[in-house]
Image: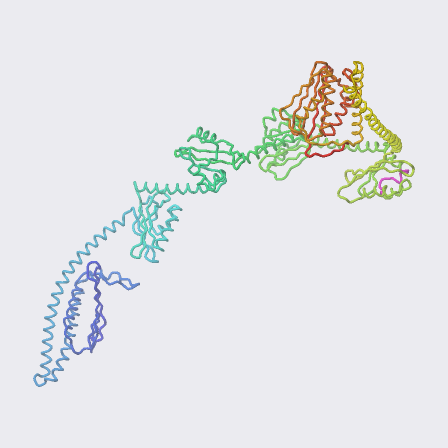
């Protein structure tokens, strides 16, 4: 056994059926020692200790029984990264007899060798001490015999006992192995079920796939199974991949339902066990599949509802949802803003309504599940009346609606309609024929000029003919130009619908007219045809040239001097009157002469700076806005000329000179005469004012003494004396009134009368006037009817002049009213103005006299009870004008007269001078 190679034995038993032990023994035989490496210390050969032989016998029997056993599992775990050699257990199981035989031979030799060496060493030691008893050869032989017999007996006993134990343990192991194989078969049958598949991940190694899914699910059976996007819907695939990442990374278990492209439902369960992650896919059927489909549909519906609500919250359109009782259950942000709620939830909780009660009742009454409500409704949003296009849909759980603000759309639509109508009216009034065709090349619009040009039947045009059909009709009527190739010409004309730029062409019509035709394609389809009649343009040009000649002849025969200059200051034309007024020859004023040279030629007649120098500056100025100028020049010759500098088109300027010598002389004579008349009028006014003042003093004395004679203290008067006193008093009063009127008018004419404004209570004013006019009414035998509202208020005016106006009008009406009749005074307020009318039933005024009724000393009516100077209405007109009011008169012969006055109220009391 010298230099023997190491020999290894390995025994592997199932972990769940045998004790946890590992028996690996290596025997190394050398010349000097025998070493057992099995957890025991290795020592040199020499003294054999107690217990060595039994331990060796046990090891030998164990080796034999292990060799005889068929299949054993290794309960010891492999080191990290080690893999058990494939086929080891199978090879041992196939040759149990051979392995057992080899093991017996090796065990026997090994045991005897290990026993013999220590025995021989001991015998040699004892032989030294007891050499005198036995010889060395005897001792050796006896030792060998005893050792062999002992070893054989011990080995036999140990092997018999171990064989019994091993057989018992082998039966138990075989029974456990059978049970394990049966369970493995059951598990494999369960895993091999076609309705499920398991994916196992062990660390970073490639995942293991176990089982399969039904073919109708569309799941791949190969490695493409893990490409979930190929056979699962995108949403399910993305959710599954995220769940698997969390499972493998953070050990988060999951249960979810996924949906394949074939609308099949699978249940996916993710778990972690023993450091491995696995996902089980189970094909659902019957009730579980229906439940899973309902769950998917529920998730889809919830997602859709959430998406729709988010979208409705994002748009600026009020939207709402109601229950069967009509109460709000959900609104979006736009609805909350419309009802001025801080949040949509608060709008729902407080029941803030966007539509009016009438509108909601109308929706509930008309909306059905088959026919949703759709109409325009007006409501108030943030204080503004707004129109909304409301759609409300009725559903079993209630209703839902949305409102679109169409106020701007309605405004734009109305504006567009007005614009189109305005454009149509504008085009219809154009003298240029216009025809518009739509995208189908059918006639959409035409104006009256188009009808007049082509003389087409209105019924034919109203039938909206095609453009090609219209051209065919015009060709048949001999109204289009004759063409050698009609088809090619028509295709060229109709190519405008495919063109980008405007096309133009000249059409020479058989009737002698020449048209320039412009055709422009519309971006939205269609085209506009414009027919410009160049015949009329040529005619206008001819007329224009003729007109220029006529104007030239006319200018030449004018008595006014005319000269036209260009923008460069050179003369374009002049007439003989111009040259005659300035005393220059035709050569000096020929066309092309500069204005400065012309000014030098005219300097003999006028050389002052306001003459030709000013004309030159105005004509040759570079100002953006050319100025016109007028004035008068008096030449050295005594001629007086009115000049005018008039800008003309094309930057030209015209100078005109009119001989005003005779007019100026006449004007000067009239001015002198007018000055004399003005001085005479002033003298008259001074005389009237002086005489009126001088007459007022004695009249006042007469009236005072007359009243004094009437007093009883001076003694009684007889009837004749009393009558004379009455006549004197009445005549004096009339004369005093006349003098006062003349003085007032003179004051007005002189412009020195001032109004004293104050607040007047109109009720008190009417009372004072009625009391003041009472004697005059009684004298005339008429009555006064005053019609006025209860509260006339007050007005800011001159109380004395306003009372004087009323008294004058009432006195005039009483004078012309028949005895026993009545006059009326109607008063009212129109804004801040005080309006009153005085009417009578007198003889009236003829229409030819109404125009002069406010003139001074106008006494055309002779039917009054008392004569007068004719100043009453004149004073009324003057005082009303001082108040910035108006007075009108309406009268018909035999029907009486109505005088209406309007007195405006001023804001602040001021003193206004009469003008």
In magenta stretch: residue 577: no
Kindly identify the residue that appears in the image at 19 percent across and 58 percent down: 17
Residues in magenta, as a range: 582-595
Q: Position of residue 781 (x, y in %)?
A: 72, 15
The quarter of the displayed image where residue 154 is located: bottom left
Kindly identify the residue that appears in the image at 18 percent across and 58 percent down: 173
Q: Position of residue 663 (x, y in %)?
A: 87, 31
Q: Position of residue 681 (x, y in %)?
A: 85, 29
Q: Residue furthest left?
A: 133
The quarter of the displayed image where residue 72 is located: bottom left
Front-lying residue, 848 or 560: 848
The quarter of the displayed image where residue 682 is located: top right
Front-lying residue, 714 or 780: 714
Front-lying residue, 251 or 401: 401
In magenta stretch: residue 584: yes
In the image, residue 864 sits, relative to residue 312, either above or below, namely: above
Q: Which secondary structure type mostly characterizes the magenta part of the structure?
A: loop
Instruction: Judge left or right: residue 676 versus residue 518.
Output: right
In the image, residue 862 sits, relative to residue 347, either above or below, namely: above
Q: How is the image coloured?
A: rainbow
């Amino acid at each position: 056994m010298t230099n023997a190679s190491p020999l290894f034995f390995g025994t592997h038993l199932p972990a769940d059926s045998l004790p946890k032990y590992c028996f690996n023994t290596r025997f190394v035989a050398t010349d000097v020692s025998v070493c057992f490496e099995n957890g025991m210390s290795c020592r040199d050969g020499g003294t054999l200790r107690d217990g060595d032989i039994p331990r060796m016998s046990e090891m030998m029997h164990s080796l034999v029984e292990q060799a005889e056993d068929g299949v054993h599992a290794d309960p010891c775990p492999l080191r990290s990264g080690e893999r058990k050699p494939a086929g080891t257990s199978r090879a041992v199981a196939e040759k149990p007899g051979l392995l057992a035989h080899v093991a017996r031979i090796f065990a026997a030799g090994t045991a005897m060798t290990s026993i013999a060496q220590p025995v021989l060493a001991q015998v040699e030691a004892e032989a030294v001490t007891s050499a005198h008893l036995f010889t060395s050869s005897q001792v050796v032989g006896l030792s060998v015999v005893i050792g062999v017999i002992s070893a054989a007996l011990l080995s036999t006993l140990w092997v018999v006992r171990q064989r019994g134990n091993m057989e018992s343990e082998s039966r138990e192991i075989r029974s456990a192995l059978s049970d394990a194989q049966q369970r493995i078969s059951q598990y494999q049958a369960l895993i091999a079920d076609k309705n499920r598949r398991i994916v196992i991940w062990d660390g970073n190694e490639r995942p293991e796939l176990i089982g399969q899914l039904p073919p109708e699910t569309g799941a791949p059976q190969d490695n493409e199974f893990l490409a979930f996007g190929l056979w699962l819907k995108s949403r399910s695939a993305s959710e599954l991949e995220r769940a698997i990442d969390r499972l493998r990374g953070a050990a988060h278990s999951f249960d979810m339902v996924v949906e394949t492209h074939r609308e099949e439902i699978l249940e996916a369960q993710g778990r972690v066990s023993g450091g491995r992650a696995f996902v089980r896919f189970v094909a659902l059927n019957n009730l579980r599949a229906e439940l899973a489909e309902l769950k998917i549909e529920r998730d889809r519906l919830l997602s859709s509802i959430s998406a729709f609500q988010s979208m409705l919250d994002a748009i600026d359109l009020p939207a709402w949802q109601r229950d069967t009782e009509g109460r709000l259950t959900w609104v979006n942000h736009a609805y909350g803003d419309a009802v001025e709620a801080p949040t949509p939830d608060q709008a729902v909780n407080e029941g803030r309504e966007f539509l009016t009660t009438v509108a909601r009742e109308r929706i509930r009454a008309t909306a059905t599940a088959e026919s949703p409500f759709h109409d325009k409704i007006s409501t108030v949003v943030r204080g503004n009346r707004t129109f909304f296009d409301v759609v409300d849909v009725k559903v079993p759980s209630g209703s839902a609606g949305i409102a679109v603000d169409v106020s701007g759309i309605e405004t734009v639509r109305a504006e567009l309609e007005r614009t189109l109508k305005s454009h149509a009216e504008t085009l219809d009034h154009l003298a240029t024929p216009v025809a518009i065709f739509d995208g189908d090349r059918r006639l959409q619009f035409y104006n009256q000029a188009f009808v007049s040009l082509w003389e087409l039947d209105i019924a034919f045009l109203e039938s909206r003919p095609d453009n090609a059909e219209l051209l065919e009709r015009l060709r048949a009527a001999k109204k289009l130009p004759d063409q050698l190739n009609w088809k090619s010409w028509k295709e060229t004309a109709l190519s405008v619908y495919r063109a980008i730029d405007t096309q133009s062409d000249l059409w020479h019509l058989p009737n002698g007219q020449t048209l320039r035709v412009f055709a422009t394609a519309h971006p939205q389809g269609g085209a506009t045809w414009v027919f410009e009649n160049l015949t009329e343009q040529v005619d206008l040009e001819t007329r224009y040239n003729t007109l220029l000649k006529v104007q030239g002849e006319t200018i030449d025969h004018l008595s006014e001097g005319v000269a036209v200059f260009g923008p460069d200051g050179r003369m374009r034309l002049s007439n003989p009157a111009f040259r005659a007024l300035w005393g220059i020859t035709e050569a000096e004023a020929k066309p092309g002469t500069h204005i400065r040279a012309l000014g030098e030629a005219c300097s003999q007649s006028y050389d002052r700076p306001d003459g030709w120098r000013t004309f030159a500056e105005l004509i040759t100025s570079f100002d953006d806005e050319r100025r016109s100028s007028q004035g008068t020049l008096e030449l050295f010759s005594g001629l007086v000329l009115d000049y005018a500098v008039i800008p003309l088109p094309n930057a030209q300027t015209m100078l005109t000179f009119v001989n005003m010598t005779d007019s100026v002389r006449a004007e000067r004579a009239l001015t002198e005469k007018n000055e004399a008349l003005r001085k005479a009028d002033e003298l008259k006014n001074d005389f009237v004012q002086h005489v009126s003042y001088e007459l007022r003093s004695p009249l006042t004395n007469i009236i005072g003494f007359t009243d004094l004679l009437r007093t009883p203290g001076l003694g009684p008067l007889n009837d004749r004396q009393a009558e004379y006193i009455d006549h004197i008093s009445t005549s004096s009063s009339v004369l005093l009134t006349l003098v006062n009127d003349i003085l007032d008018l003179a004051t007005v004419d002189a412009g020195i009368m001032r109004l004293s404004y104050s607040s007047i209570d109109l009720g008190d004013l009417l009372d004072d006037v009625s009391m003041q006019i009472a004697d005059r009414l009684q004298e005339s035998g008429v009555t006064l009817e005053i019609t006025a509202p209860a509260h006339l208020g007050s007005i800011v005016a001159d109380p004395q002049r306003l009372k004087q106006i009323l008294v004058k009008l009432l006195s005039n009406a009483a004078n012309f009213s028949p005895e026993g009749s009545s006059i009326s005074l109607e008063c009212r307020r129109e804004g801040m103005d005080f309006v009153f009318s005085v009417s009578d039933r007198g003889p009236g005024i003829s229409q030819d006299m109404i125009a002069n009724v406010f003139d001074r000393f106008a006494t055309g009516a002779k039917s009054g009870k008392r004569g007068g100077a004719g100043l009453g209405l004149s004073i009324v007109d003057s005082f009303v004008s001082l108040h910035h009011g108006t007075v009108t008169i309406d009268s018909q012969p035999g029907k009486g007269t109505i005088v209406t006055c309007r007195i405006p109220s001023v804001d602040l009391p001021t003193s206004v001078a009469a003008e």
